[in-house]
Amino acid sequence: MTNTAPGAILVNLDFGNGDLADRRDEFVLLAQSAGTRVLQVIEGKRERPDPALYAGSGKVEEIAAAARMHEASLVLFNHELAPGQQRNLEQKINAGKDADADGVRVLDRSTLILDIFAQRAQSHEGKLQVELAQLEHMATRLVRGWTHLERQKGGIGLRGPGETQLETDRRLLSDRVKSLKDKLDKVQKQRSVQRRARSRGQVMSISIVGYTNAGKSTLFNTLTHAGAYAADQLFATLDTTSRKLYLPGAGNIVISDTVGFIRDLPHTLVAAFRATLEETVHADLLLHVVDAANPARDEQQLEVNKVLAEIKADAIPQILVFNKTDLTALRPSAERDEYGRISRVYVSAKTGAGIDLLRDALAEVAAARQAAATAVQ
């Protein structure tokens, strides 16, 4: 049976960041998560991006040759491309092709992530959020990519209709964006009512956060037996799922599984998913899941904390959960900070090792919170 998934050439350039291999491996997984076949990865070193082509002209020739050799339909850049760069790259890579032939499309990292989100969104809210992010991303390309029509003062076929079409496109896009934002506002208000009800009942709220593919959904399932979708791919979970969990000695808590974070997450996505991320912002405690087996785990922690700061959730107490200990020499254990509070727990969500320690840690935090609330009354 032939593989009908689109074939892609991946481009990963080094601008002196020092983590080229990590970025390449992550981008390969991103491309595979989007449903593409990775045909070749092209790398190179530059001091700074080329204003017209992002990569140098020699590198673009190499990319075009690889695309022809492999008969690729996509070229994916592990970088943010300006609309003009994207257009210039497509022209260069498709130069000399028959006008009737399907051209090779050039996409950047943000567009790829948006495409994965579009494939994975299941709930009504998730689909609204993804569409909003895609439209806002498209808007920058519509305005910047079509400015040649606005500047056009004459020329057959470009005098009036081009401008009118652009204005129509802008208006339709703007109307749809407004409509989506209104719908998401209603969702946000509904969530706010639910949170107030939980707060009145003194139910502790916990959000599971972490880098994508750190094992958040597997941990969520192991703790709550919820059966949420979990897979070894990036952004397996998009829609926030919440479940009640009973802890002996502490009663019920509400635990939520949230979308994973990734470096260079498009700002349009962070903005669009703010309604979902509200669960994180209003949580009493964050379980920050870290892939203990990943060599880049320290950088991944920093990236997660960066997004948490962006959504104003960086002041919420955290317990670091080092997951996937079954793939390392680490043993299940719990560590306390200088104040005697549990700060780290080492577990394997897959095998269940150390989960009892994590439950005990959550019960301890919930009990301390109840005691503090009682003392205030």
Image: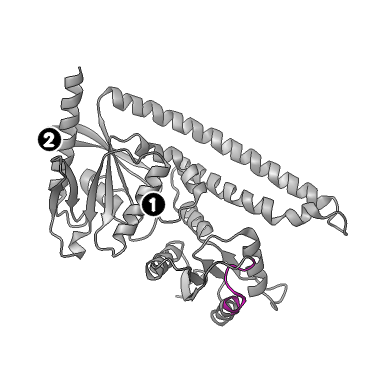
The residue nearer to you, when weighing 273 against 116, is 273
Q: Is residue 32 left or right of residue 372?
A: right
Q: Is 310 on the left or on the right of 89, as rendered? A: left
Q: Is residue 58 magenta?
A: yes
Which is more N-terminal, label 2 or label 1? 2
**Amino acid type of disc 1?**
Phe
Q: Which region is colored magenta?
A: 52-61
Which residue does the image show at 71% across and 72% down from the upper left?
A: 100
- The outermost residue toward the top is 377
Whether the magenta-drawn stretch holds residue 82 is answered as: no
Numbered label attached to residue 180: none
Density class for disc 2 (Cα within 10 Å; few <14, some 14-19, many ≥20) is few
Q: Quadrant of the N terminus?
A: bottom left
Which mark's residue is nearer the viewer, 1 or 2? 1
Apparent side of residue 110 relative to residue 338 in the rendered image (left or right): right
* Camera-side residue of 238 and 328: 328
Residue 176 visible within the image? yes
**From the viewer's perspective, is residue 289 above or below residue 79?**
above
Q: Residue at x 39, y 43 (%)?
A: 309
Foreground pick, 355 / 332: 332
Distance in Å between CA atoms under marks 1 and 2: 32 Å
Location of the C terminus (image quadrant): top left
x and y percentages locating residue 360 in the rendered image:
13, 42
Residue at 56% across / 66% down in the picture?
A: 49
Residue type at numbered disc 2? Pro
Q: Position of residue 269 (x, y in %)?
A: 49, 48
Q: List the residue tagged with mark 2.
A: 248
Find disc 1 in the rendering and name its residue: 261
**Residue drawn at (53%, 80%) of the image:** 70
